[in-house]
Image (cartoon, rainbow, N blue to C red):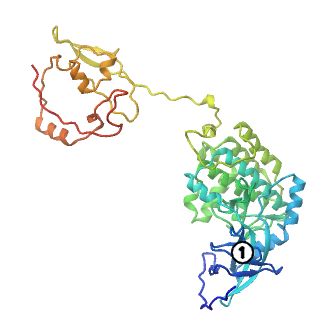
């Protein structure tokens, strides 16, 4: 490996939390972990491969930060103590679970570059995150997919809580899909920078830790700086609600942390009334989930089986498999599950029919004395949406179904207008009226076409040229 040319150290900036941003390390840089294992950085940022067996797919991910920063130090210790491969495999066997949504840890250490010291950690690499997919799908996921993700995340929380820790920052950006064969439909909970031991003794507000996490989803307990297991479930619930209903009521107030906290307190004080007001279309299962969480004490262990059963029953009601493919795109025309978000079955949804009002027309009989007759039995046929409507010519004594669907040219050729005497009427303020007609283009100016003889596409506006005709 050729030696890199020495470069001048770049002064690092700091983010909003006061932590320094890491300087980008070049491709081919070799990192050596505490177990003396070497890792080579790939071309994309954050990808790596083993130095002795370089894989062009770079199946590992490297998290790196300046040594003085704190989040990666906490996360590294969490993996070493809690999420090592032996413990994860043992837990999976005890729960009879094939895949657990916890990243696989491979190593960590320190690295010097440009006279700066860095801390790094190597874990398995994953695919897309749920947040970017949520945005790409018009901020909505199919209900069945939401419930499947919930089941997998609850398993991950169960493992973390069994190890006396909480995650504290569950959100779409920290939920990644697997890329290994057989894990493409599995969700992995990453980023344990805020992971810490939960509280079981006295519930005491900690101003230093207050409002920890991501404000949109932070639990009421974390708003007070108290890490609890029920708080993880509350955070998960806010994510599920957002995936189902697109938005959360406090999203516009995230700059005011106390205001967000007040709204969440109102929510958790009476989930049923709050959801009836702000989430009227939310599925019933979400009422049940939040109602349960609101009754759990801060030092209680959540009932993981009960929560999983809620979503399992809902999947069965939707006739969707508990496992299998995760379909994130919502197709409002083909996705049948979207029809029963409001607890309706396919049979309960009424079919919308267009009702055409009955119009009254004045028919003049020219063979006898001119008398106005109201005709209520003649109905205008239903118009196809996007197709221009046909205006019935005046002074016509007889109208048939075929006449109604004729074009103006066809109507003239069939002796409709030519053989019908019409009285020429000159409207008042002729000049002003003509001027407005010349420049106003409306769907009424488009020629009506008979089905099967359509020459102009629906929605194409054609300006009608009005020519003077002399009637005899």
On screen, 465 above or below 131?
A: above
On screen, 236 above or below 384?
A: below
Q: Which residue is outermost to the top?
A: 368
Residue 297 appears left or right of 415: right
Whether residue 208 can be seen here? no
Res 28 quadrant in image: bottom right
Of residues 380 and 360, the one drawn nearer to the viewer in this rendering: 380
Of residues 437 and 62, the one drawn nearer to the viewer in this rendering: 62
Query: Where, quadrant-wise, is the N terminus in this rendering?
Result: bottom right
Give the structural element (helix, strand or loop) at label 1: helix
Q: Position of residue 299 (x, y in %)?
A: 83, 59
Q: Position of residue 140 (x, y in %)?
A: 59, 50
Residue at the spot 71% in from the left edge and 59% down from the top edge = 178
Res 426 quadrant in image: top left
Residue at the spot 63% in from the left edge and 37% down from the top edge = 340
Mark 1 lies on residue? 71
Residue 241 appears left or right of 78: left
Whether residue 461 can be seen here? yes
Q: Residues within 10 Å of mark 1 (few under 14, many from 20)?
A: some
Q: Position of residue 2 (x, y in %)?
A: 67, 87
Q: How many tags in the picture?
A: 1
On screen, 204 above or below 37?
A: above
Residue at the spot 25% in from the left edge and 18% down from the top edge = 362
Res 80 quadrant in image: bottom right
């Amino acid at each position: 490996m050729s030696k890199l040319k020495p470069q001048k150290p770049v002064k690092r900036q700091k983010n909003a939390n006061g932590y320094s941003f890491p300087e980008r390390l070049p491709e081919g840089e070799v990192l050596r972990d505490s177990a003396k294992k070497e890792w080579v950085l790939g071309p994309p940022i954050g990808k790596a491969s083993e130095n002795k067996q370089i894989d062009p797919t770079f199946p590992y991910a490297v998290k790196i930060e300046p040594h003085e920063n704190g989040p990666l130090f906490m996360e590294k210790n969490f993996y070493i103590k809690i999420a090592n491969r032996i413990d994860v495999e043992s837990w999976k066997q005890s729960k009879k679970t094939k895949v657990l949504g916890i990243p696989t840890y491979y190593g960590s250490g320190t690295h010097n570059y440009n006279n700066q010291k860095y801390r790094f950690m190597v874990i398995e690499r994953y695919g897309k995150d749920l947040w970017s997919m949520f945005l790409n799908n018009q901020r909505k996921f199919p209900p069945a997919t939401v419930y499947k993700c919930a089941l997998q995340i609850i398993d991950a929380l169960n493992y973390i809580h069994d190890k006396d820790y909480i995650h504290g920052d569950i959100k779409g950006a920290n939920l990644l899909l697997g890329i290994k064969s057989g894990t493409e439909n599995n969700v992995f909970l990453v980023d344990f920078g805020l992971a810490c031991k939960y509280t079981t003794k006295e519930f005491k507000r900690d101003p230093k830790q207050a409002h920890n996490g991501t404000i949109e989803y932070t639990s009421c307990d974390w708003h007070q700086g108290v890490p609890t297991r029920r708080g993880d479930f509350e955070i998960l619930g806010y994510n599920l609600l957002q995936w189902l209903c697109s938005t959360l009521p406090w999203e516009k107030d995230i700059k005011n942390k106390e205001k967000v906290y007040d709204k969440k307190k109102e929510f958790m004080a009476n989930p049923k009334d709050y959801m009836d007001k702000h989430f009227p279309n939310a599925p019933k299962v979400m009422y049940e989930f939040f109602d349960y969480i609101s009754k759990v004490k801060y030092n209680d262990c959540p009932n993981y089986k009960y929560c999983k059963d809620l979503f399992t029953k809902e999947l069965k009601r939707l006739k969707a498999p508990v496992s299998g493919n995760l379909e994130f795109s919502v197709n409002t025309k083909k996705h049948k599950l979207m029809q029963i978000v409001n607890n309706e079955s396919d049979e309960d949804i009424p079919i919308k029919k267009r009702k055409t009002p009955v119009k009254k027309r004045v028919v003049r009989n020219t063979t006898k004395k001119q008398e106005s007759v109201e005709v209520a039995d003649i109905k205008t046929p239903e118009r196809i949406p996007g197709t221009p409507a046909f205006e019935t010519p005046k002074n016509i004594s007889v109208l048939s179904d075929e006449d109604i669907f004729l074009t103006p040219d066809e109507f003239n050729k069939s002796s409709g207008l030519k053989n019908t005497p019409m009285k020429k009427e000159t409207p008042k303020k002729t000049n002003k009226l003509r001027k407005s007609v010349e420049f106003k283009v409306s769907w009424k100016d488009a020629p009506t076409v008979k089905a099967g003889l359509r020459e102009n596409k629906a929605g194409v506006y054609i300006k009608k040229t009005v020519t003077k005709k002399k009637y005899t």
